[in-house]
Image (spheres, coloured by chain):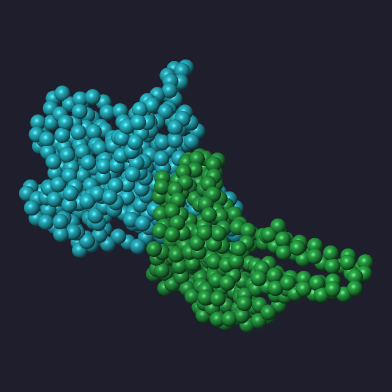
Amino acid sequence: MRNRDLTTDHAAKVSNAIRDAVRPRTWRRTVMVRALAVASVLFVVGDYAFPADETTNPRVTAAGTEFGAIEGAIAYRNDPNHKWRLARYYLKSPKTGELAEAVVALNGQTLKRFASPRKPTVTSIDQKEMRFVPETVAIGAGDRVRFTNSDPQTHNISLGDPRLRFSDTIAPGQEAVETFAKASGIRHPFALGCTFHSQMQGWIYVFDHPFFEVTKSDGRFRLEHVPPGDYRLEVAHAAGELQASRAIHVEPKTTVKIDFILTPADRSPAE
Amino acid sequence: MLQLMSRNATNKGELTRRELFSKASASTVAIMLSQFALPDLVFPGEEPNEEPVPFLKLPRVTRKMLDWETLDNWLTPQDQVFDVHHYNEPALDASKYQLEISGLVERPLTLTLDDVHKRAVGEELMTLECSGNGASAGFMGAVYNSRWTGTPLAPILKAVGIKPAATEVVFFGSDSKVETIHDVKVDVPFGRSMSIEDAMNLRILLAYARNGKPLERRNGSPLRLIVPGWYGIANVKWLKRIEVRNRRYMGRFMGRDYVTLRGERHGNEVVFVESSVARMNLKSIIARVTRRPKQNGSIPIKVYGAAWSDGTEIAKIEVQVDGGPWQAARIDATPRSKYSWVFFSLGLDGLRPGKHVVVSRAIDVKGRTQPTAKDDEIALKKTYWEAYQQVPREFELLA
């Protein structure tokens, strides 16, 4: 739930407590007022002491019943004339086509409100057998990524993006941590590479709101606590160079069901 | 020294004006390039109901590496071509480019790129492998086959006149780095060398195009060395200077890295010897396994693969299943070229559902056999370069 709404509720609670306090004090009321004061402080402090876990969706709130949700599945349908050579790593089966490691994200102006401060999470990306593992991650603006090296070789992760530059030489067993302060959006993720091993590839998607997910092998996704409104739901698969987008409308207390079937026609090579 | 090519895999339309111009002005020998279309499936006999069976426990294939399991092209497409550089990756201005040939020569020479393109055109079909290929499960696709176009080196060396005192030719690249050598910091260029004899006899090409297209920066544009039959490290990119010398060149990539340390048995002793990486070793690998529907309780499979060497002809390729007897595979009669890989295939019957291991080995006309990881040749090798041992492939047949 958003901190601002909590604070508003909290302010109401405190002012009620003060009003109660003005009435003739009894021992019982004194205890209640003091307990309320402590509880209200804990309630707000707790937001920082016990931050949201590393999932991407916001925490449930007592007053969160006016939100909607979006869920569905992403699939890929092949075309023998335009084969995706490496599809075998991402499709559950060529026949059913459930697409793993697709990034699903909402896009909409009002979503920027949800870029409120929270304790940054740390996501790990390992370098193993000359691969970035996982290959695709999606995080929030301000989050950090810890790069570890499980290989016997030294790697150098460099990002020469105008939005963010770094060059980390990481010996075997060592690590480096980088902060991704700015959102990338779904169309232009940060592309990872190793200076020494040109085959290494990875992508980091950064969003300034919490409504995103990376699909697993079943291709499914679910975005929760979505404020009602009009948005675009966007899908991208970096390794497959696929992009798609659909307009959606979210109603309170309703789950929008939406599936995507991507084809080679959705190919859009990354920059 | 020019190769008369009877076939290529690209359209004539892809030849640049430069190439056509240089052909027109080549005085002595003409290149015959006739077109032919490679079949869709490079392995003839692959049938529609053959289903690929993925290998187990392999890291993902990513970009800029050969994807063995979908191998379908004798000439490797550019997007599956690997590249390695140890220093920087220079971006050279073609209009300002100069190649210097100097040192112990009678008539030192400087060639612009135009000069190089105006010289006689030569082509070489060659499989180029990184000497680190195969050293780890994550680095198995650093090999590719190409049609290289350029101008032969030998006539240039003859023209400049090598002095009698000379013993070596050193090839310097435009890439360089500040290295610390014996506690001294110096800016050194990338370099590799070879004997005069090798430089004159190995059909070396100063190459400017791959598969009919100009070299990419990552592969050494605008000019690189192509040494047929030698590992990638010898194929110097971003060529800057060819220097003839009378002392052994002992640069990092001759004497310190790309040096194989191997124990060799002499009577009762094992003597450890270091030698510079040069010629490619005889090697074969199974690219993929396919299956067809089960018949009478057993599943027919087919094994496809590739084999290559330093140019020594490959006599036989054999395949072994689950430690059983070695069976001779069928080697494709075409396409063939001395320095390029050959493709092979073998149908195998009688496999039951479950896990299996297949492995191939190549044997050349001189009787050399590709070793296993346990043979001395590999087991006593203490450095990772030159990993040419047999490659077991594990797969699972579901019912």
Quarter residue B21 falls in: bottom left
Q: Residue at x 16, y 55 (%)?
A: B19
Say above or below: A210 vs B282: below
Chain depicted in cyan: B
Q: Nearer the viewer, residue B179 or B245?
A: B179
Spot the residue most to the top: B268
Can I make out residue A4 in this image? yes
Residue A250, image x, y percentages: 60, 80
- Whether B278 is drawn above or below B41: the answer is above
Quadrant showing the N terminus of chain A: bottom right
Viewed as shown, does residue B157 lie left or right of A270?
Answer: left
Residue in the foreground of this view, choosing between A141 and B96: A141
In the image, residue A196 sits, relative to residue A220, either above or below, namely above
**Which image quarter holds the C terminus of chain A?**
bottom left
| Number of dots carrying numbers | 0
Vertical side of A258 occupied by A192: above or below: above
Position of residue B297 measured from the top left corner of the image (x, y, whole percent) = 59, 58
Image position of A156 (left or right of A173): left
Residue found at x 53% / y 54%: A179
Q: As drawn, which residue projects farthest toward the right?
A: A27
**Looking at the image, which residue is at 68% across and 59% down?**
A48
Residue in view at x 20 percent, y 33 percent: B243
Percent across and percent down for residue B285 are 43, 46
Chain given the colour green: A
